[in-house]
């Protein structure tokens, strides 16, 4: 299973790549991180929601109803979540460094949905990089890749 996940993550730049459809927990964990990034300022903006939905339906091959339900569940979980360690633990422990860098790029695409990074978003991304054991240079490369993907580089 981890080999399939690793292959999917590494192929993030390939438009044909998608997450294994049988790994609902992995998709939910990624969705949780995306929601945390989107809601660090207290609101889920339409552009952020659109980016999360695109990742869930496009990259993870969830149908729209399942993606909406997962997103709603993660937004509800955000209201009661007091720490991020639970979300990142499995990713950190079971994925290679290059896979975690791509996950950071995915999160950066949500953070950059409005074209800017405020201080709360920057602080969250530094925390996530630390929790995922992604160094500053790799996180900066992920940010630049996300900007390029969004056409704001």
Image (spheres, rainbow, N blue to C red):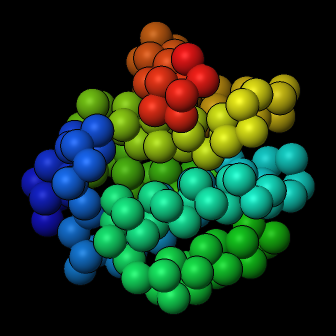
Observer able to see residue 46: yes
Q: Nearer the viewer, residue 145 or 99?
A: 145
Please, which residue is most extreme toward the right here? 42
Q: Considering only vertical position in the picture, is 124 above or below 69? A: above
Q: What x and y, as percent, mark residue 114? A: 74, 39
Side of 31 relative to 115 (left or right): left
Q: Residue at x 79, y 48 (%)?
A: 40
Quadrant in which residue 34 is drawn: bottom right
Q: Considering only vertical position in the picture, is 96 above or below 147? A: below
Q: What x and y, as percent, mark residue 97? A: 29, 31
Quadrant in which residue 68 is drawn: bottom right
Q: Residue at x 71, y 53 (%)?
A: 47
Q: Nearer the viewer, residue 92 or 115?
A: 115
Please, which residue is most extreme toward the front here? 151
Q: Considering only vertical position in the picture, is 146 above or below 109? A: above
Q: Quadrant of the C terminus?
A: top right
Q: What x and y, as percent, mark residue 100? A: 36, 38
Q: Residue at x 23, y 80 (%)?
A: 22
Q: Quadrant of the N terminus?
A: bottom left
């Amino acid at each position: 299973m981890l080999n399939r996940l690793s292959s999917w993550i590494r192929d993030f730049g390939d438009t044909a790549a998608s997450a294994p459809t049988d790994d609902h927990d992995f998709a939910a964990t990624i969705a949780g991180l995306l929601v945390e990034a989107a809601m660090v300022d207290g609101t889920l903006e339409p552009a952020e929601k659109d980016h999360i939905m695109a990742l869930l339906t496009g990259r993870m091959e969830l149908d729209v109803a399942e993606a909406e339900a997962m997103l709603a569940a993660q937004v509800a979980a955000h209201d009661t979540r007091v720490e991020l360690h639970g979300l990142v633990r499995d990713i950190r422990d079971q994925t290679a460094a290059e896979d975690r860098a791509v996950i950071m790029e995915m999160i950066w695409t949500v953070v950059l949905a409005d074209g800017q990074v405020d201080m709360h978003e920057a602080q969250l991304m530094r925390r996530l990089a630390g929790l995922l054991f992604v160094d500053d240079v790799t996180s900066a490369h992920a940010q630049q890749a996300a900007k390029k993907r969004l056409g704001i580089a």
